[in-house]
């Protein structure tokens, strides 16, 4: 029997340290006015405590999602940690698995930058649709503050640290909440947004191989902006079209929280009312894989979403990658 998949709980975590645009202007040559008018961002949270990593935020968000439905961690079958800033290149998901006590869960990282949460939810739902797993924890978490060049005013003003988590559970297919998805990649433009690995000039003297290290975030802001505003509406329309839905059916549009101007430009292209757009980026900046579940948890906590509401979730970012999920709450 084909199973349905439903988001049954949400959680989130942000560091306590807030950095305002005014404070940013003491670090780089910028101003609150420039940042706010270009991006809609007022402040961001940064993980500053020594020894803390993406794992700590991911654990906090996961515990909140489990506690809100009193779920025993041993019932979780799979953990997917969407992150591009792991604390260990071999992956951070297994530390999350250990720290939350999900002793029966397999855990792995999924790297897809700001599209990571959307791709992870789609991945998780496949394990549920085919009947393999019943309860899956999907966490989007990033600490891009560790990878930002704090002297580059073009990028450092944009990013913040956070984690968001959802628990997806199998259900009978007529209660299915994940109705459709659409995922895309265009690696031709990977250089528009990257944390590149740079090789040293001198090879190992005997083995003749090159080692190196990762660089800071580099971004072509204008091209990333154009990409998001052109591709995200197409992805949303195609995803709705395939299930005979239209923009009029959508109650909430939850996009990756990159930039208020991107959100409003996409809304305008889709002719969707701006009060259906979920946005909390003024308080957090762009938190990469965490941004969608962080904003989702906020609207869930505020009881804004009603049963049966149609939510369109759209992620986009480095890769370049982008994707849409249509779900019924
Ligand atoms: N404060 C003040 N001035 C700044 C600045 C800052 N933080 N960052 C850049 N500038 C300056 C530039 O140096 C440039 O000055 P110049 O004209 O003297 O050379 C000027 O502002 C315009 O820079 P530009 O890069 O053309 O700005 P923009 O209008 O494209 O806005 C972004 C920059 C980053 C806000 C915009 O391109 C954007 O939002 N892109 C999408 C980024 C994104 O969302 N990435 C993540 C996707 S997941």
Image (cartoon, rainbow, N blue to C red):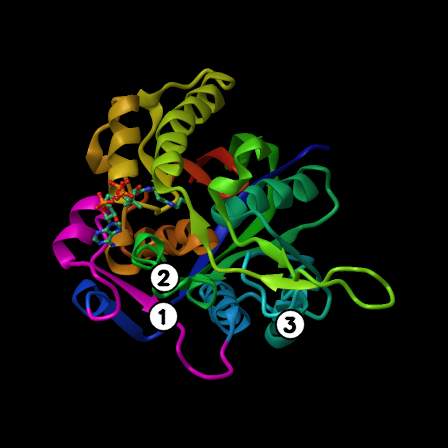
| Residue drawn 64% across the image and 69% down it | 88
Provide the residue designation for mark 1: 46
Badge 3 is on which residue?
95
Task: Give the image quarter of residue 264.
Answer: top left
Q: Nearer the viewer, residue 99 or 173?
A: 99
Magenta residue span: 26-52
Tag 3 and tag 1, C-beta contact below 8 Å: no
Residue 231, compared with residue 71, is above or below; it is above
The tag earlier along the polypeptide, 3 or 1, is 1
> What residue is drawn where x is 73% and y is 33%?
1
Pair 2/3: label in front: 2
CA distance separating discs 2 and 3: 22 Å
Q: Secondary structure at mark 3?
A: helix
Q: Position of residue 328 (x, y in %)?
A: 44, 35
Mark 3 vs mark 1, CA separation in Å? 21 Å
Residue placed furthest toward the left: 33
Label 3 vs label 1, nearer the camera: 1
Query: Vertically, is 5 above or below 301?
Result: above
Is label 2 in contact with label 3 (beta carbons under 8 Å)?
A: no
Q: Does residue 38 show up magenta in the picture?
A: yes
Q: Position of residue 84 (x, y in %)?
A: 55, 56
Residue under pointer 2: 160
Question: On residue 81, which mark appears?
Answer: none
Examine the rendering and report whether any part of residue 172 can be seen: yes
State if disc 1 and disc 2 touch (CB < 8 Å): yes
The residue located at (31%, 33%) in the rendering is 251
Residue 235, image x, y percentages = 46, 25
Q: Position of residue 271 (x, y in %)?
A: 25, 22
Q: Is mark 3 within 8 Å of ligand 1?
A: no
Q: Left of 300 or right of it: where is 184? A: right
Instruction: State which tag comes first along the sequence, 2 or 3.
Output: 3
């Amino acid at each position: 029997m084909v199973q349905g998949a439903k988001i049954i709980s949400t959680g989130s975590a942000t560091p306590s340290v807030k950095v305002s645009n005014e404070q940013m202007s003491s670090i780089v040559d910028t101003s609150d006015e420039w940042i706010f008018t270009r991006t809609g961002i007022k402040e961001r949270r940064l993980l500053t405590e020594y020894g803390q990593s993406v794992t700590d935020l991911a654990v906090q968000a996961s515990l909140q999602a489990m506690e809100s439905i009193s779920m025993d961690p041993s019932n979780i079958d799979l953990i997917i940690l969407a992150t591009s800033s792991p604390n260990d290149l071999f992956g951070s998901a297994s530390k999350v698995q250990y720290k939350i006590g999900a002793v029966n869960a397999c855990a792995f990282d999924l790297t897809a930058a700001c599209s990571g949460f959307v791709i992870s939810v789609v991945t998780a739902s496949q394990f549920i649709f085919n009947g393999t797993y019943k309860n899956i924890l999907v966490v989007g978490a990033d600490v891009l503050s560790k990878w930002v060049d704090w002297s580059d005013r073009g990028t450092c003003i944009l990013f913040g640290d956070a984690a968001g988590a959802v628990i997806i559970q199998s259900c009978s297919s007529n209660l299915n909440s994940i109705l459709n998805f659409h995922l895309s990649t265009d690696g031709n433009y990977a250089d528009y947004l990257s944390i590149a690995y740079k090789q040293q000039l001198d090879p190992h003297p005997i083995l003749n191989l090159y080692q190196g290290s990762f660089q800071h975030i580099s971004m072509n802001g204008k091209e990333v902006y154009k990409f998001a505003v052109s591709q995200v509406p197409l992805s949303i329309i195609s995803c709705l079209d395939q299930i005979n839905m239209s923009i009029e059916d959508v109650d909430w549009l939850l996009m990756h929280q990159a930039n208020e101007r991107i959100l409003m430009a996409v809304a305008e292209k889709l002719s969707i009312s701006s009060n259906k757009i979920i946005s909390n980026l003024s308080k957090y900046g762009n938190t990469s894989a965490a941004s969608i579940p962080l904003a989702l948890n906020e609207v869930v906590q505020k009881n804004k979403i009603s049963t049966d509401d149609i939510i369109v979730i759209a992620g986009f970012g480095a890769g370049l990658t982008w994707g849409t999920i249509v779900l019924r709450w």
